[in-house]
Each structure stands twice: as C-alpha cells, then as structure tokens.
Image (tube, grey):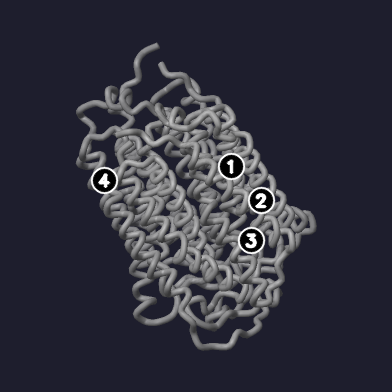
Amino acid sequence: MKKSSTTIFWLSLLVALLAAVYAGAGLFAQGGKGAFLFTNLYGGTVEIYGRGIYHNDSTFRALIFRGTDAVTLFICVPALVFASVLYRRGSLRGHLFLTGMLGYFTYNAASLALGAFYNNLLLVYIGCFSASLFAFILALCSLDLSVLSARTSENLPRRWIAVFLFVAGLSLMVWVADIVVALFRGGIPNHLGHYTTETTYTLDLGVILPGVYLTGILVLRRHPLGTLLACVFILLNLTVGLVVAGQTTLQVLNGIVLTPGQFAAYVAPFIFLSLIAAILLVSILRNISEPVG
Amino acid sequence: MKLHPSLKRLVPLIFVLAFAAALAGLLPGEGESYPLITFRGEQVMIHAKGLYYWDTVSSASQMQANDLVMLVLGLPLLAVSYWLSRRGSLRGQLLLTGTLGFILYTYITMCFGAAYNKLFLVYVALFSLSLFAFILCMMSFDLKTLPERFSEKLPRRAIAALLFFAAVFLTLAWLGRIAPTVLQDAVPPLENATSMFIQAMDLGVVVPLCVLSGVLLLRRSAWGYLLASVSQLKFLTMGLAVSLMAFNMARVGVPVSIVELTVFPAMSLINVVLVVVLLKNIREGSG
C-alpha cells in the first residue's frame, strides 16, 4: 500500500477550515442597508444586494453565491474532511474522492476570488484557492496510474461515463450562446450587470469544457487518467445539482417565485444530471477494488 | 524528451489568435476619455476609445503595453523556441514552456480583468489553449535525466535568491494594499474592476510557485531545475511587460508608485543576466 502524503492531508484540512470560514460568513452575515438600484456603465439597471458579505454584488449573483455557500458549508466541507480521513488511511477510493473534492474547492474559491465583488474575505478566498489548487495538483500527480489501472474492473461502464460527460459538457454551450447573441445584437451579455467580465464563463469554457471532453476520450481509450479525471468532473457535476437546489431554496426564501416553466428549464435538468452523476460516481467507486490489509 | 504531437496544432493556433488579439488592442480608436464616479465612489477615467473602450485609462495603458510586448517579443520567442524544440533542443523546450507561461498569464488577466469586450471568446480560447499547451510542455520533460543536463557551475543560490526576492516583494506590495483596508472595513483603490484579480493570481499561484521553485532548486530536485528555469524564462517576457506597463502608465499621466516603477525593471534586468547564465549552463544532448 502506497503511503499517503501528509502535505496533501494537512493542506486539505486547511482548505476545509478556510472554506468553512468564508462559506459561513457568506451565508449568515446579513448586516447592511438592503437592496437598491444602480445604473451601470452601459446604462442598464442593476439591483445591488446591499447586505452581508456580498453587499456590493448584484442580487442575482449574491443569491447564487449564498446558495453555493450553503452547499459548501453543509455538504462539501464535511465531505472533504471525510475524504481526507479515508485518504490518510491509504484508501485508493479515498484518494479519488479527495482529488474530486479538491477540484470542487479550487473551482469554488477561484470563482469567489476572481468573480465576487471585492469584500473583506478576499485574502481568505485567495488562501483557499491557493491551498486547494496545490493540493489538487499534488493529489492528481501522486496517484499511481498503473495501480489504478490494475484495480479497475472490466465492468466499469465506460460508454455511459463518456456519454454523460459529453452531454454534461454540451450544457456549458449555453454560455457561448449568451455571448454570441450579445455579439450579434451589439452590447453586453445578459447578466454582466456592473461586473468587469464573466468569470464563470471563463472557468467553464476555458477549463471545464475542454477538460470534460478530454476526459471522455481518455475513458473510451481505457486510459487510467480518464478514470481519475472522470471522478473529478462527475463529482463537480454532482455538486452543480446541489448548488442549483441551494440557490433555488434561497431564491424562494427571498420571495422570488419560480414559474413551473422556469423550474423545468433552469432547475430540474441540473438536478436530473446530478442524480445520474451520483449513480455513475457510485458505479466507478464500486468498480475499483481495495486490497485487504 | 519528445514534444507532445498535439503541440503541432496548439502552438500555431495560439500564435495566430494572440497576434490578432494583441494587434486589435493596439489599433487606435476615436474618442475622448471621460471621468466617471464608480459604484464604490471612486473617480476613474474611462478610456472610451478602441477595443478597450470600457476600461480605465490606467488599465488600457497596461493592456496596450502588454500587447506591444506580445507582438515584439512574446510571439517571436514562441516561434523561435518552438522551432528549436522541434529540433530537440532542451533550451528551446524550456523557453517554449516559459513563453507559453507568459501567454497563459496574459490571457488569464485578460479573461478576468479586461472589461467585457468583443474579443472575450478569443481571450477564453487563448487562456484554454495556452493552459493545455503549457501542461503538455511541462509533462514532456524527462525528470530523471534533467538535473544532469545542468552544469555544476549553475548559480543556484543566485537564482533562488531572485525567486525568493520576487515572492517577498509581491507579497509585501499586494498585502500592503489589501491588509490595511480590511482592518478599517474600507475598500482599496480598485478603479472600476470587480475585484483584485492580479493580486489573486500573484498571491495564490505565483508567490507559492516562486518559493517552491527556489527551495526545490536549492535541494537539487529535478522539479526545482524545471520550475526555476521555466519561471526565469517566463519572467523574461513578463518582466519587460510589467516594466513597460509602469512606464506607459506614467506616460499617460496615471500616478505610479515609485517602488513599482524601479523594482520591477531592476528585477527584470537581473533576470535577463541570470537567464543568459542559465542558458550557458545547460548542456544540449547529442540526440
């Protein structure tokens, strides 16, 4: 059994601590004058949230951030701690699970460090982004791919995994559609508001989309790196469904009522994809054997 | 050490897109800059011309300085180093990786820091292409034989010292802007940017990498040789870009701190000397 790295273990716990701090503050801090309207550079009207950590963000994005914080705090932080403990015991599945969770935290902390309006937690976001990025790279590079290959069962549903990744990747093309519409109509994307640019579009189109397709191809080619990266992206997809559920809950709590049409278009598909992601993740982990002792 | 075959497509594509994007940024436009009070009550000058229409005068002058460095140094180095790498040169491969690092950093900052403009998707494509090309380059070095390609005379301490100095300087300069405002519950000067993307990238990625490269180089680890030489070669272009940014800001009348105006060019000059020493101390294989 390969020894687990203490650096990865302690970095992961540091990530859990920093994330608990920013997600807790983001979710619960509520002081401030409340929402108001602001005219942006382009002459459009933006509703500013005006409360808590995200007081300078638009109401649209502040609710997204807070919904994500709820999932980060109550589900992802405990999952990260659990994964770190499994990893420390030398479990291969634990290693895969931990790598996936670190991928989530790198994405989440980068989104806040680069995409949330400047607030007092910036240094916490940067610290968490840095710790999770380096822990993620270490976890990715330290997994012995020949061992993973040897322990992966022939029954791994490679085709289903690849099809799922291709479909989930395709859903990111809605961002491209938003920009192309803006280019033809002249002007800015729909939800730019008072922000400099679209952070989520950059991360999703620049890293996640090519990463997901590359992973699908590697899985079909039976490359063990495909199995490892599939865990990362499927886990990320699983959290997207949870995050959408969290965001919807917060919107409802804030009195924003979704019509059944909106629910069917913006909420249900993500939760559906998330359920399939959960099934596939369990299936991958079941098809990886742990030696006894 | 073989280059990954995908680079044959990635590098020319990066070259063409970066050439177009940098040229578009430098094209002069019609318009008169105007003052604006931002959402946070800060007064800024909106550039109001050319591609960087919605950026501030300060930010546009920095992006244009970077565009110029991309055209006159970054892209020629990309072409030359790619040609050398194809012929199996280790120096060429290190320079290619470093130059891709510069292009990656540039388009990360354009993606997250330039006010949304028509080239947004081109910036995202360049960020993505150079990220994957950079990873492929990093993975193509043979770490087992790498240390023996460097001569014993390589001034590892001097290189590590410059890396540590860069880490300390960036940390103090950027924390100096953020920390005091956190204590006073105020907001540091941000112009009209959403947040501090340069500080996030530098403190989150560049500073830890500088420290890590320096420590690993002193320990003679293979990763140390690789990371330190790539950092040095990346800073060859980046250093010129940052120095030119400061001068261009001063030229258009934006206040620039005297520390940044002197320390960045000084660091870049020392780095140029160390790059020459580094390249002299690499042995090319016979194969």
**Residue B143 location in percent, x, y?**
41, 31
- Gap in Å between the C-alphas at discs 3 and 1? 26 Å
Q: Are marks 4 and 3 on the same chain?
A: no
Which of the numbered marks, if any, corresponds to residue B5? 4
Q: Amino acid at mark 4?
A: Pro
Q: Which residue is mark 1?
A: B210
Mark 2 or mark 3, whichever is nearer to me: 2
Q: Which residue is mark 3?
A: A118
Mark 2, other Cα within 10 Å: few <14 / some 14–19 / many ≥20: some
Dot 4 or dot 2: first in sequence order is 4
Q: Which residue is mark 2?
A: B170
Which quarter of the figure is the C terminus of chain B placed in?
A: top left
Q: Is residue A250 visible?
A: yes
Compared across the picture, whether A287 is left or right of A250 comes to: left
Mark 1, other Cα within 10 Å: few <14 / some 14–19 / many ≥20: many
Q: Is residue B132 above or below residue B189?
A: above
Dot 2 or dot 1: first in sequence order is 2
- Gap in Å between the C-alphas at discs 2 and 3? 19 Å
Return the chain for callout 2: B
**Residue B222 location in percent, x, y?**
47, 30
